[in-house]
Image (cartoon, rainbow, N blue to C red):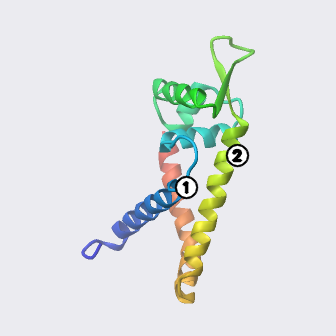
Amino acid sequence: MGNQEPVEDVAEVLVGVQRLIRRRLRRDLAGPRLRGAQVELLRLVLAQPGIGVSGAARELHLAGNSVSTLVNQLVSVGLLTREPDPQDRRAVRLTVTREAVTRLGDWDARRSALVREQVAGLAPEDQAAIAAALPSLRRLAAGLHADLEAP
């Protein structure tokens, strides 16, 4: 990271932190390992129960056939269900299973505990710097999201 601009450091550090969190949490993970796109789809369906494949593809900015593949994978491991759409029998409505809700909740709780523990081990000035940076990082995320959603 030494010779980079600070903004380049931000992206590198964020990716690195996310990767390390995933690696630490995967060590004790029960059940099949899920890829990032699978988790994104599960989180979307949890937030929007009954969403269809095409709606999920739009939200995730993926091709419909890619989302169909993800749906098939998640249905086969019991984390997602699909039901025919009552208004359009050719379409399906997606919902997460109880197992998926439990798994996502467990992951989130373990992630929060891990980060809380690591931040607690930092010096008070580092904890304050992280807290002070959060509003700016949220605005950065919002800008990236808006840019992605722009036509």
Is the residue 4 above or below the residue 18 in the image? below
Q: Which mark is drawn over residue 114?
A: none
Residue 47 versus residue 24: which sits nearer the camera? Answer: 24
Say which residue label 1 marks.
28
Is the residue 101 above or below the residue 16 in the image? above
Which element type, helix, strand or loop, lies under badge 2? helix
Is the residue 95 above or below the residue 105 in the image? above
| Amino acid found under the numbered disc labelled 2 | Thr
Residue 91's spot in the image, x, y percent?
63, 17
> In the drawing, does residue 150 fall left or right of residue 2?
right
Is the residue 32 above or below the residue 51 in the image? below
| Residue found at x 60% / y 80% | 120
Residue 105's spot in the image, x, y percent?
68, 51
Q: Label 1, label 2: how many angstroms apart (C-alpha)? A: 15 Å
Which element type, helix, strand or loop, lies under badge 1? loop
Q: Residue furthest left?
A: 3
| Residue found at x 49% / y 26% | 69
Residue 47 visible here: no
Q: Quadrant of residue 138?
A: bottom right
Q: Quadrant of residue 10?
A: bottom left
Residue 62's spot in the image, x, y percent?
47, 33
**Residue neighbourhood size for the residue with mark 1, other residues' Cα within 10 Å, grouped as few (<14), some (14–19), many (≥20):** few
Name the image quarter holding the N terminus. bottom left
| Residue found at x 50% / y 43% | 33
Q: Earlier in the sequence, mark 1 or mark 2?
A: 1
**Residue neighbourhood size for the residue with mark 2, other residues' Cα within 10 Å, grouped as few (<14), some (14–19), many (≥20):** few
Q: Which mark is drawn over residue 102?
A: 2
| Amino acid found under the numbered disc labelled 1 | Asp
* Tag 1–tag 2 contact (CB < 8 Å): no
Residue 14 visible here: yes
Residue 31 versus residue 129: which sits nearer the camera? Answer: 31
